[in-house]
Amino acid sequence: MTENWIILGATSSMAKAFARAVAEDGARVFLAGRDMADLEASATDCMLRGADAAEAVAFDARQQSGFAAIVNRVAEEEGMINVAVFVGSMPPQDAIDADPSLIEGVVMDSYTGPAAFLQTIAPEMENRGGGSVIGVGSVAGDRGRIGNYVYGSAKAGFHTYLSGLRNRLTRSGGHVVTVKPGFVDSAMTWGIEGMFLVAPPEKVAADLLKAVEKKKNVIYTPFFWAIIMGIITRIPERIFKKMSV
């Protein structure tokens, strides 16, 4: 039976790579985001790659009133419902320091909006007895760092939410994968100084599909970020607070 994939934040480079991959597997794809022209172009591309169907749907993480319409649309289709969350925003930390009102948007984009959507669709997934959720968090959520601690705190909250949702959905046959990417070649990292070991989106997409297949709970991508963050999280606070990382 055809798999349904709802891809939130489908205009990002990671999301587009993932959409191409599941399209080639013959999935039915719902590309959700704000730039409808971009989404329509991606839907056409997905169809050319072998998708069973591809549809652009309007989604804004800050407008929860629109979530039910997406859930209701997807519920019309047969097959398991899967969701991949690529939503997030990361203004420069110095911009947030200058204008604390930016915090609300970061938290809504990176945590509360995606979480609210998943809460809305979870009952339908439970009713169907399965399905997968891929929640893209960030290595930034593993420890508060001076360069992006607001974004990191939002992703840390999302990580915890995904852990609880995993506990919930596993009881009905579903599964949740928490993904912690390092630096990825995307609009979020373009122009930022100090980028290193930047991964191509296609590599991340392949890791996500493998994690779903093997029902991994938490993954770092690329894998070596698990080692890097293992070191960073073990640095004593008295030392870490003097570092610029």
Image (cartoon, rainbow, N blue to C red):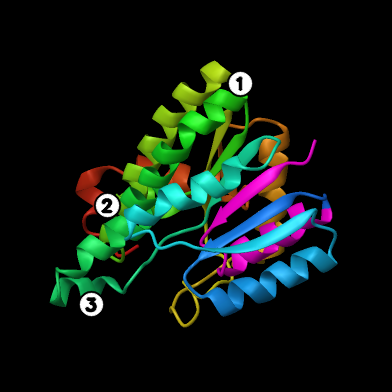
Task: Tell me where residue 59 sits by quadrant.
Answer: bottom left
Location of the C terminus by quadrant is: bottom left
**Real-space CA distance between mark 3 and mark 1, rounded to the nearest whole angstrom:** 43 Å
**Real-space CA distance between mark 2 and mark 1, rounded to the nearest whole angstrom:** 41 Å
The residue sitting at 39% across, 54% down in the picture is 140
Residue 220: where, in percent of width, then height? Answer: 56, 46
Question: Disc 2 or disc 1, which is closer to the eye?
Answer: 1
Question: Disc 2 or disc 3, which is closer to the eye?
Answer: 3
Residue 96: where, in percent of width, then height? Answer: 21, 71
Q: Secondary structure at mark 1?
A: loop
Question: Label 1 is placed on what type of residue?
Answer: Gly
Question: Which residue is tagged 1?
Answer: 173
| Horizontal side, residue 54 vs residue 173: left or right | right
Q: Which mark is residue 95?
A: 3
Is 17 a magenta residue? yes
**Residue furthest bottom as drawn:** 191
Location of the N terminus by quadrant is: top right
The magenta segment is 1-24
Q: Secondary structure at mark 2?
A: helix
Q: Secondary structure at mark 3?
A: helix
Residue 51: where, in percent of width, then height? Answer: 79, 57
Tags 2 and 3 in contact by the CB under 8 Å rule?
no
Nearest to N terminus: mark 3 or mark 1? 3
Query: Which of these two is toward me, 24 or 202?
Result: 24
Is 180 a magenta residue? no
